[in-house]
Image (cartoon, rainbow, N blue to C red):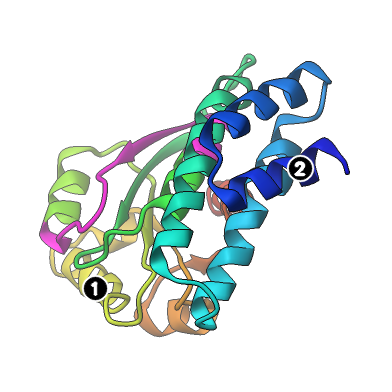
Amino acid sequence: MSKLNELADLVTEGENEEVEELVKACIEDGIDPLEILNVGLVEPINVLGEQFRLGEIYVPELLIAAEAMKDGVEVLKPHLLSGDIKKAGKMLIATIKGDVHDIGKNLVAMLMESAGFEVVDLGMDVDPDDIVEAIEEDEDIQILGMSAMLTTTMYAMQDTIEALEEEGLRDRLKIMIGGAPVNQTFADKIGADVYTADAASAVEAAKALLS
């Protein structure tokens, strides 16, 4: 079994300390940090997320694995953020009102920073008015990223975009959305610029939006 497959298994089992140690071992072996992130840490969470959606596992199992993944990401983060990185732009990111899922949002924020973006993270359960206020107060923000994991909360994205339009701020920035219940069709419907399915493609989309 490869180290990355072993790492994925440890994440799935929620073995926090073992995950941290194996991430360190992978780094020492010269494995690319992005590969460690995507294959060893993110992919097992994606698999568990699908199993959860299908009713094959329950919330505690998903949360235990997510905590192990977070611990692994913390070990990995300095290696993703290393190097002389040219500033690429500024992004505001948030999980929208009513939603307290932040794994995907945090991964996007981390990879955006590693690609040279300055990221302002408002956290979870963020009201549209708070997003509008943050954008009003910071003219350097070029991209708004919004995340939702529930069909019951995803329309808060639309509320946020409408609030930006009312304040005359919508045309000042690009809007990206992501999360399990949304897709490009939904992005088009609510007036967002782009949907991305994962953290890595979010970085590429952000670069393309500002190019």
Rendered view: 194 above or below 137 = below
In this picture, which residue range is highlighted in magenta?
Answer: 110-129
Q: Residue at x 22, y 37 (%)?
A: 138
Q: Amino acid at mark 2?
A: Glu
The answer to which of 122 and 87 lies nearer the viewer is 122
Q: Which residue is mark 2?
A: 6
Q: Amino acid at mark 1?
A: Ala
Q: Residue at x 38, y 61 (%)?
A: 147
The answer to which of 17 and 29 lies nearer the viewer is 17
Q: Residues within 10 Å of mark 1 (few under 14, many from 20)?
A: many
Q: How many marks?
A: 2
- Corner quadrant of residue 49: bottom right
The answer to which of 84 and 152 lies nearer the viewer is 152
Q: Which residue is mark 1?
A: 156
Sequence-first tag of 1 and 2: 2
The x, y position of residue 41, in whole percent, is 63, 45
- The answer to whether residue 176 is left or right of residue 203 is left
Rendered view: 120 above or below 116 = below
- The answer to whether residue 12 is left or right of residue 109 is right
Q: Secondary structure at mark 1?
A: helix
